Image: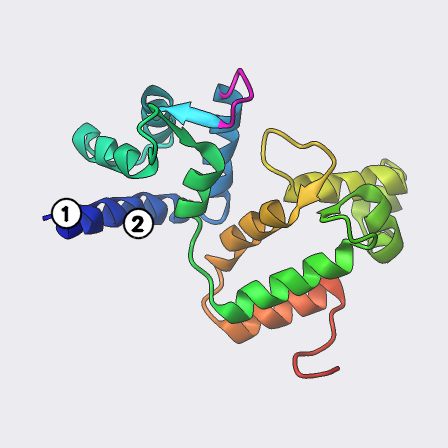
Amino acid sequence: MGDRLLKRKFALIEGIRQQLLQRGCGGLKHLTTMFRRMDYDFSKCICYKELYMGIQSMGVKISESDLKLVFELMDNDNSGAIDFCEFIRYLSPPMSDTRIRVINEAFEKLDVNKNGQIEVDDLQVVYAGNVKRHPKFVSGEWTEEETLRNFLDSLDTPGCPDGKVTRQEFMNYYAGVSSTVDDDCYFDLMMRSCYGLRPRGNT
């Protein structure tokens, strides 16, 4: 009975994930933004009421009884709250080892000073060349730093950019992108082209 209930809970999470993915790679980001705005005390936790409000406002179809099952699965310590980041990890689409590897490779290249996070200073070393092709930089509307910061914010946790992108935030962003790309080889090629990584198999 316990195994069947657990499978039911995971199936419900998968149902929520699929409904969010129907909105494209931005669906999960929008839900993330919403929960960040609800986290008034910066606890990085959400209660059942906040979960219910967020899911409802996104138009996800799930009964209240089923949503309570999902909450119970996530509330490991029975505290009445679930860890926000863990919840997002549950919803993030699973990725193959090939995709995870190339995402980590891109992160390692961008994290120039190897402090475990990407900042504007890192991007100025390895990504500044891309700035010159950005329309707003070309037009003079943005400076180099503003252009790099805009790129950094697009990778950061939605609704809560702090100028630093951790490996997990980078992975979460590309998990959403990954959900829109069917072929592993194409995803790998796209990442290598975007970040100037060596072709797979080259040393």
Point 86% across, 45% down: residue: 121
For residue 31, side relative to residue 118 (left or right): left
Earlier in the chain: of badge 2 and badge 1, it is 1
Evaluate whether residue 69 shows in this view: yes
Residue 50 is situated, as x and y percent measured from the top left of the image, at 38, 22
* Above or below 43: residue 32: below
State which region is magenta: 39-44
Badge 2 marks a residue whose secondary structure is helix
Residue 12 is situated, as x and y percent measured from the top left of the image, at 25, 44
Q: Residues within 10 Å of mark 1 (few under 14, many from 20)?
A: few
Point 48% across, 20% down: residue: 38
Evaluate whether residue 139 shows in this view: no
Residue 14, numbered circle: 2
Residue topped by disc 1 = 2
Point 59% across, 29% down: residue: 159
Q: Amino acid at mark 1?
A: Gly
Give the residue at the far front of this rendering.
77
Q: Amino acid at mark 2?
A: Glu
Majority secondary structure in the magenta region: loop
Residue 168 is situated, as x and y percent measured from the top left of the image, at 59, 48
Depth check, front residue: 188 or 117 = 117
For residue 12, side relative to residue 46 (left or right): left
> How many angstroms separate mark 2 from mark 1 (CA)?
19 Å
Confirm whether the magenta stretch covers residue 41: yes
Residue 139 is situated, as x and y percent measured from the top left of the image, at 87, 42
Mark 2 vs mark 1, foreground winner is 1
Confirm whether the magenta stretch covers residue 55: no
Depth check, front residue: 48 or 190 = 48
Badge 1 marks a residue whose secondary structure is helix
